[in-house]
Image (spheres, rainbow, N blue to C red):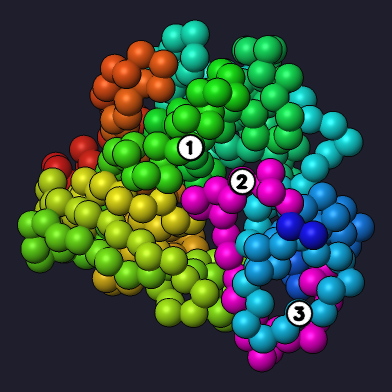
Amino acid sequence: MFKPDVTIRDDAPTYTIGEGEAGQRIDRYIASLLGNVSRTSVQQLIVDGGVLVNGHTSKPGYLLRVGDELCMVQSTLKSSGNAKPRMLPLDIVYEDEDLLVVNKAAGMVVHPSPGHVDDTLVNAVLAHYPDLKHVEGLRPGIVHRLDRDTSGLIIVAKNARTQSALIEQMKRHEIVKRYLALVEGVVSIDDGSIDAPIGRDPRHRQQMAVTATGSREARTHFRVLERFQRHTLLLLQLETGRTHQIRVHLKAISHPVVGDPVYGSGNTRGNPSLNRQFLHAFQLTFTHPATGKVLELEAPLPEDLKFVLLQKSSL
């Protein structure tokens, strides 16, 4: 039966079932996507309405059919309760009674997931703001996400009203997000746009790819800030917010992010101080839901990325 109170996030991963997957039980298929997760946990995820099939909830034993559309409404598994607070450092760039903007450190996961139960941004936020514990689920206050090894600005709502309003802004593409990325190779044009749909990689199901199958529209705009001998520093702006969008789009134009272990070579030779992808959420512009004021916030490059650029500038 369809659950009318289910809110499908703009960035919720979707999958289209092909002939190779047809006939599988849905719980087996979802378990293969999530990796090292027990079948029992996946079955509970499905029972709780965390996976929709053609817009409807399903049973764990449902047999997939060609053309079925699966939507991961909840891509993390529920624990025995809500996320637990843990006092971890937060670099707060902006704060008021309704929201805060955090400069997330590289290496920090945004919300609890298998393998990251109590060391995430959500755990830290709950420790600093105990009132958020009354918001149900494992993502209290989270409006959008950043990859674990991407540093930079992320908005956290302090109440459900603000969270809902900001998520609606995200859906309408009204929140401007700009990133700095160092990419492989020398980008020849000064600015441009990448308009290519992104969906689940049919060969590597835990990765995303530019594909026409089961994909959603995705657009990334870029401008060259500086060219080096073998690399280019780009300022990027997202028009849409698909999973791994910048990394996938830059790979598609043969200029992957330096140090990206999934969509690039992962090669950091010549950059000995770099042990992660060179991607930083640099600027955020959005309208405050309560005051109507336009907030324009910026987080400078962290020291590890600054050092890489200094090395290149001295060559």
Residue 57, image quadrant? bottom right
Which of the two labelled residues, at mark 1 and mark 2, occupies the earlier sequence position? 2
For marks 2 and 3 on the same chain, the one whose residue lies earlier in the sequence:
2
Q: Residue furthest right?
A: 40
251 displayed left or right of 207: left
Residue under pointer 2:
7
Q: Is residue 14 magenta?
A: yes
**Kind of residue at disc 1:** Ile
Residue 265 visible in this rendered orientation of the protein: no
Question: Residue visible at 38% across and 69% down?
Answer: 197
Q: Secondary structure at mark 2?
A: loop
Residue 225 in the image, given as x and y percentages of width and height: 13, 46
Label 3 sits on residue:
64
* Residue 90 vs residue 25, the one in the foreground: 25
Q: CA distance from mark 1 to mark 3?
A: 31 Å
| Region in magenta | 3-28
Say which residue appears at 62% left-offset and 12% top-offset.
Answer: 128
Who's the residue at 60% across and 24% down the image?
A: 160
Horizontal and vertical percent position of residue 176: 29, 38
Q: Disc 1, disc 3: CB below 8 Å?
A: no
Q: Are marks 1 and 2 in contact (CB under 8 Å)?
A: yes
**Three-letter residue code for mark 2:** Thr
Residue 167 shows which numbered tag? 1
Q: Nearer the viewer, mark 2 or mark 3?
A: 2
Q: Is residue 283 left or right of residue 272?
A: left
Left or right: 47, with 115 as reference point: right
Q: Is residue 271 above or below residue 89?
A: below
